[in-house]
Amino acid sequence: MAALALSHHSNSRSLAYRSLTGRSVADAAIVNDRDFDAHVFACLLAVAAMEEGMLGERLGLCGEDLTALVERWFPHVRSLSACQVRGTDNEDDELVMVRDLLLAHRSTTGDDGRWLAAMVARRAMEPNHLWEDLGLRDRSELSRLLARHFAPLAARNTKNMRWKRFFYRTLCEADGVALCTTPVCTSCSDFDLCFGEESGESRLAYSRREFALTEMTVA
């Protein structure tokens, strides 16, 4: 079995993704749904691997779920250590609300959707674009993930609002709270916060490029 590279080094994301999938993130196989799901899980594991703290906590999964996920999708990888899989007993109320929102709109059966609801909710607590903090390559991959596993919720985002903002708006509307007071979005001074461009270089791609430059410098 291959070792899963989960150390906190600048190139750990790329190494972890390759050890999980056998290929670089740039060459990810995502044509069919199963390959796409494997890519998503590999991205999540890889991006959380380079951050400080326990892997389970960074992904919002308890130890049993994280172990089961790796065994289901990446059985060729060695078992994770106890410090890597251990989750947290203290869950933020905001995290729970987003996770429950996703769980209430699942469109696939089995554990995958449940794991993804927990992981997406946890990564939504991070400060960057949601697709970036999931380790994905661009926003379109996040949209595909949500349309596949949480279709009823994804279908409601008819204005192509930023996903994190959309989650919170949906939660507020469910509680009868107005997230904003402007009746027409296009006349709102905060329009870009909800609908602005979400481009940029993925964290995995940046890690791979940084590592390549380091190797060239050493050589």
Image (cartoon, helix red, strand yellow):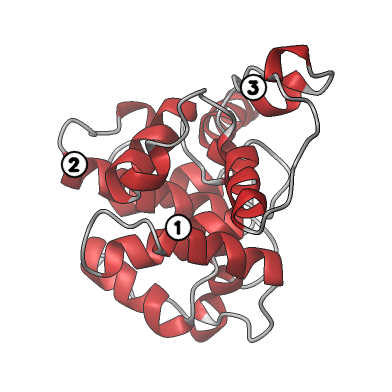
Picture coordinates of residue 66 (x, y %)?
41, 73
Return the disc, 1 or 3, that comes first in the chain's sequence: 1
Picture coordinates of residue 24 (x, y %)?
36, 35
| Left or right: where 60 falls relative to 80 | right
The residues bearing labels 1 and 3 have C-alpha atoms spaced at a distance of 21 Å
Picture coordinates of residue 72 (x, y %)?
22, 68
| Left or right: where 85 falls relative to 65 | right
Kindly identify the residue that appears in the image at 51 percent across and 54 percent down.
Answer: 120
| Left or right: where 218 falls relative to 84 | right
Kindly identify the residue that appears in the image at 60 percent across and 70 percent down.
Answer: 96
The disc labelled 3 sits on which kind of residue?
A: Phe
Q: Nearer the viewer, mark 1 or mark 2?
A: 1
The disc labelled 2 sits on which kind of residue?
A: Asp
Give the answer, above or below, for where 203 lies relative to 6: above
How many marks overall? 3
User: Foreground residue, 146 or 52?
Assistant: 146
Q: Can see residue 11? A: yes
**Which SS class for mark 3?**
helix
Q: Can see residue 3? A: no
Picture coordinates of residue 215 (x, y %)?
57, 30
Q: Which residue is mark 1?
A: 102
Quadrant for residue 121, please give it. bottom right
User: Foreground residue, 90 or 29?
Assistant: 90
Q: Which residue is mark 2?
A: 33
